[in-house]
Amino acid sequence: MTLLRQRIREALANPALQSALDKNAERRKEVRARAFASLPDEGRPLKERAHAIRQAVMDDLDALLETFVRNAERNGIRVHRARDAAAARRIVLEILQTHETRLVAKSKSMVSEEIGLNEALEAAGMRVVETDLGEFIVQLRGEKPAHIITPAVHLRREDVGRTFAEKLGIPYTTDVSVMNAAARRTLREVFLRAEAGISGVNFGVAESGTLCIVTNEGNGRMVTTLPKVHIALMGMERLVPTLDDLAVMLDLLPRSATGQKLTTYVSLLNGPRRPDDPDGPQERHLILLDNGRGALREGPLHDALLCIRCGACLNACPTFREMGGHAYVGDRGQPTPYPGPIGSVVSPGLFGVEHFGHLAKACTLCGACAEACPVGVPLPDLLLEVRREWVETRPPETRGSRLGMRAYAWMMTHPEAYRLLRKAAALGMRLLPRKDGWLTWLPAPLNAWTKTRHFPIMDGRRWTVDGRRWMGEGRPWTVDGGQWTVDDRMRTSHAAPRTSQSMPIFSAEVTGLNGEVIRCTPDTLGQALSDWLCAKEARTVLIPPGEGLPAGVRAALRERGLHPVEASLPAADPARQEQLEALAEAEAGIAVAAAGLASTGTVVLVGEREQPQTSSLLPPISAVILREADIHRDLQSFLKAGGGEFIGEKSAVMLVSGPSRTADIEMTLTIGVHGPGTVGIFVV
């Protein structure tokens, strides 16, 4: 507890940290509100359904895990069960050492932070590179992530500029686009040369054995596609029963995490490369981690396992917004990978209440975290339970503490005494200094509050701030009497629309994502593609092999002087490595979409025989061909129209929404990171 207080004081006294946290909090609040405003009733019915789905998973976890593992193995994924962090590290090391791995490219994974994976791999002589921009920045600085979603939330652009100047050898700059370009150049070599890729998993789909990974920058697709071996790390609770349930989660997770309707890339991975696939990993491994989750599920903190790691509770929490993620430390100063409200429950639950239980004492119990949670985790109740358990691990209270708490309890359970005290406090507050409706100073011992924040004024009847209620009558995390209910009508609310309704929506969404929509016919497709690519000054163009392109397109490209190259990777080195480096030099790529999703401006791409993943991933310019008749209203409509069976048949399916993007440096949006920065969709 002493170390926690020390970290908090250091955070509050750090003006650079306070500036960075303030910018993140305001921006996150704004984009999240806008994203949920696009849902009926601001997403409340969807949140209730999501809560029911996650609760059903927890109630039937053992059976769902068995189904998920069976289907994943049927798809060709090699599944490993890890009882604890040491077992997980050992399994990863054995896989990598079997393949004589020297360089590992990592996508963001909180589970890898939980088990201390990077340190173990580096101790074994491997080079491990974090490829998410925020993770890359903190790795260069020798720090731990400060946030579940935005690891570098604690840094200003000046901090990043100095780090890049020192570690990457570029001139000091505060231009975010220049810094992103430097990171892209550095990490490009890692993607092309890494023998193995490691990622997390956002959701596992039991009915199909599918791994779902959501990212924005393109690094997630890189590490799961280009290396010969892909290892996915997944907490065993991160399941959904069906693809329909996954669609519900994908409606909520991006909105809660980054304020997007859908992340730029949603990778649905069913297995490794098949014999006739043009690219993809030779092996795909999944490590299912327990590490205390089984025990947590059986205890009073079991609802913490409902969490989908969106980070919304961190962004809403007034405590986190002042102290940041690095202040959340254990009793010996050990950091936790899970800060904020959810971390103050998960960390004690997984790593011991005696070591991390004091984190719950940093909470004000305002309820903002539960209000922000998209799946209805009752965080204030869980935090109170952690406090109760933590107190039981402590030495007996002093006589003074016991008397004080008894007096407080008596007052709070006797309304007349409470009202009398409130009136007395209101009179006393008239004598204290105030500013803008807040008290700026309180006498000891209450001055512990006003050293770093103002205090609301009591008017004798209620707490007010500028004449408004400070707290509502009920607990803000209570919904329908404390229970999240599900309206069965919501289960069938997504009716498939006519294409004529979908096209204008699709076009508007793509344009809003910094993409372009070009309308054409089968006869004009080749000319339209060639004109667009020439206008972008592209010369070498990656195309699907064989008959993957519509008739006439290849000839039209050549007529305009463009150089089409079939995008496929040999299965074995050294030919594979040589071909990969050659493909990476192309200025543009063409892919053919299986479907479009109007509500999010998304195209559905597959990785199979004549449809390589590299053509839409490696070049900075991406052209996608989409039939207008294949545009559906949303993901739910696509699944109902046979999309679920379609996804289950492929080794990999990608949902792509616009160009790659990041906002990891001071929430400054930059288009084009590891994936394409220019995307044109040719609707035929």
Image (cartoon, rainbow, N blue to C red):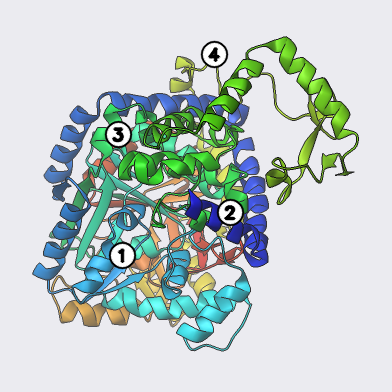
Q: Tell which circle, 3 or 2, labels the residue nearer the N-terminal end.
A: 3
Q: Is residue 398 above or below residue 165?
A: above
Residue 274, x across and y down, in percent? 15, 57
Q: Nearer the viewer, mark 1 or mark 2?
A: 2
Report the residue marked by disc 3: 296
Mark 4 Cα within 10 Å, few/some/many (few <14, many 20+)?
A: few
Q: Nearer the viewer, mark 4 or mark 3?
A: 3
Residue 593, x across and y down, in percent? 39, 53
Residue 127 appears in the picture as rendered: yes
Q: Which mark is residue 301?
A: none
Residue 453, x across and y down, in percent? 72, 48
* Distance between the alpha carbons at the discs numbered 1 and 2: 33 Å
Q: Are marks 1 and 4 in contact (CB under 8 Å)?
A: no
Q: Tell which circle, 1 or 2, labels the residue nearer the N-terminal end.
A: 1
Q: Is residue 121 left or right of residue 167?
A: left
Q: Are marks 1 and 2 in contact (CB under 8 Å)?
A: no
* Kind of element beneath mark 2: helix
Mark 1 Cα within 10 Å, few/some/many (few <14, many 20+)?
A: many
Q: Tell which circle, 4 or 2, labels the residue nearer the N-terminal end.
A: 2
Amino acid of disc 4: Gly
Q: Nearer the viewer, mark 4 or mark 2?
A: 2
Q: Which mark is residue 323?
A: 2
Amino acid of disc 3: Leu
Q: Are marks 4 and 2 in contact (CB under 8 Å)?
A: no
Report the residue marked by disc 4: 481
Report the residue marked by disc 1: 223
